[in-house]
Amino acid sequence: MESFAGKLAVVTGGGSGMGRELVRQLVADGCSVAACDWQAGAVGDVVAAVRSGAPPGVRVTSHACDVADEAQVLRFRDEVLEQHSVDHVDLVFNNAGVGGAASFVLDSREKWERTFAVDFCGVYYCTRAFLPLLIASGDGVLVNTSSVDGFWATLGPGLPNTAYATAKFAVKGFTEALIEDLRINAPQVQVALVMPGHVGTDIIANSRRAAGLPSPEAMSLAQLEELIPPGARAGLVRVGRLPANPSADDLRQALSWLEASFRDKAPLTAAQAVAIILAGVRSGTWRILVGRDAGLLDAAVRAKPEAAYDYPALFQDVAARAKEGSQ
Ligand SMILES: NC(=O)c1ccc[n+]([C@@H]2O[C@H](COP(=O)([O-])OP(=O)(O)OC[C@H]3O[C@@H](n4cnc5c(N)ncnc54)[C@H](O)[C@@H]3O)[C@@H](O)[C@H]2O)c1
């Protein structure tokens, strides 16, 4: 697909971060977009902002939908067909995602399954709902967002990420499994897998909101201790963001810092990440690594899979590759 002009794209999680940028950049390219989010106000604001500058003939709609709820996904699909007066869609970006339930041991089953449901079942339900419409397009592309956590199941020393990584591995497996299935049974649809490294977005704050938690200043000590588990606290102590025996106020400040610095100190902005994603889709590649960090980690893990969780060995390998690449 060399151009998005005149096409119709579905974007999940369009209210923030990479989803918001997908809406902006696709519309700027002349593509109509139907974007959904569980934060209906956020995706409504994104759509209202891009609509005014949209090229003639480009239609942009916003929809309230929790992708982890199949009935809501089916309602979203029906709204898309009705509001865009179409019988097919050309692109589906399964982008919505949240973090949460990092520990299988410590976190509740309910929280763990909720993160898995958003990050994997959301992709699965949307693919079930929209694949027939991509087939009907005659030239469809399904773009599923996994993560570096889809091939490396941790956030690093002391930082397990079990629900998220399990779901992102599943997204990767599902998407790769579709390659041969579509090639044989629906060759008019291409599939692409997106694996971003660190991209500056509000995903930490949005994941807190999705867990029903208030802003850091309004959180209780128990909520803070659950959200910032021991391994993460130790990491914050190491980088000088927390004293050894933190008070509730210390934890509140550290969480605010974490949310802001994840967004503001990333190697890539959401706009840069989406430019890479859309260039990948245009080129027809199925494997879209986003960011130098993602590329280096992918190369290191594939070269020495046994060393993936031996952090000193892995980080040494990544550093050597980075040095080699910069020479
Ligand atoms: N930011 C990163 O560093 C990074 C790295 C790797 C992968 N990713 C993945 O990229 C995708 C986009 O993340 P982002 O960083 O732009 O985050 P973000 O929080 O800025 O945007 C995600 C959007 O998805 C929405 N969303 C969450 N749960 C939903 C649900 N159940 N139904 C509908 N919408 C829902 C959120 O409300 C939000 O608007 C996610 O799948 C994420 O896991 C992000």
Image: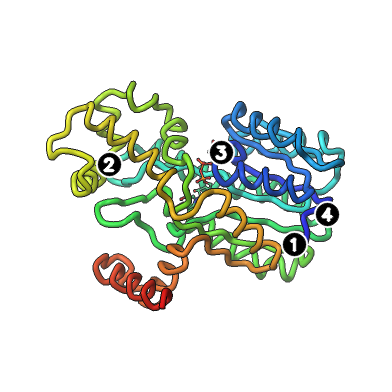
Q: State the image coordinates of residue 260 (x, y, percent, origin top left).
A: 39, 38
Give the CA distance from mark 2 to mark 1: 41 Å
Give the CA distance from mark 1 to mark 4: 9 Å
Mark 3 / mark 2, whichever is N-terminal = 3
- SS of the residue under disc 3: loop
Question: Please, what is the three-letter code of the amino acid marked with disc 4?
Answer: Ala
Image quarter hosting the C terminus: bottom left
Question: Please, what is the three-letter code of the amino acid marked with disc 1?
Answer: Val
Mark 4 / mark 2, whichever is N-terminal = 2
Location of mark 3 (residue): 16
Relative placement, left or right, of 249 versus 200 is left
Q: State the image coordinates of residue 232 (x, y, percent, origin top left).
A: 26, 45
Residue furthest front in the image: 327
Image disc number at residue 136: 4
Some atom of ligand 1 lies within 8 Å of the CB belonging to the residue at label 3: yes
Question: Please, what is the three-letter code of the amino acid marked with disc 3?
Answer: Ser
Location of mark 1 (residue): 189
**Please, which colouring scheme is shown?**
rainbow
State if disc 2 and disc 4 touch (CB < 8 Å).
no
Mark 1 / mark 4, whichever is N-terminal = 4
Q: Residue at x 73, y 52 (%)?
A: 91
Crowding at label 4, few (<14), some or many (≥20) Cα neighbours within 10 Å?
A: some
Tell us which disc is closer to us: 2 or 1.
1
Relative placement, left or right, of 227 versus 45 is left
Mark 1 / mark 3, whichever is N-terminal = 3
Location of mark 2 (residue): 106
Give the CA distance from mark 4 to mark 3: 29 Å
Relative placement, left or right, of 123 versus 100 is right
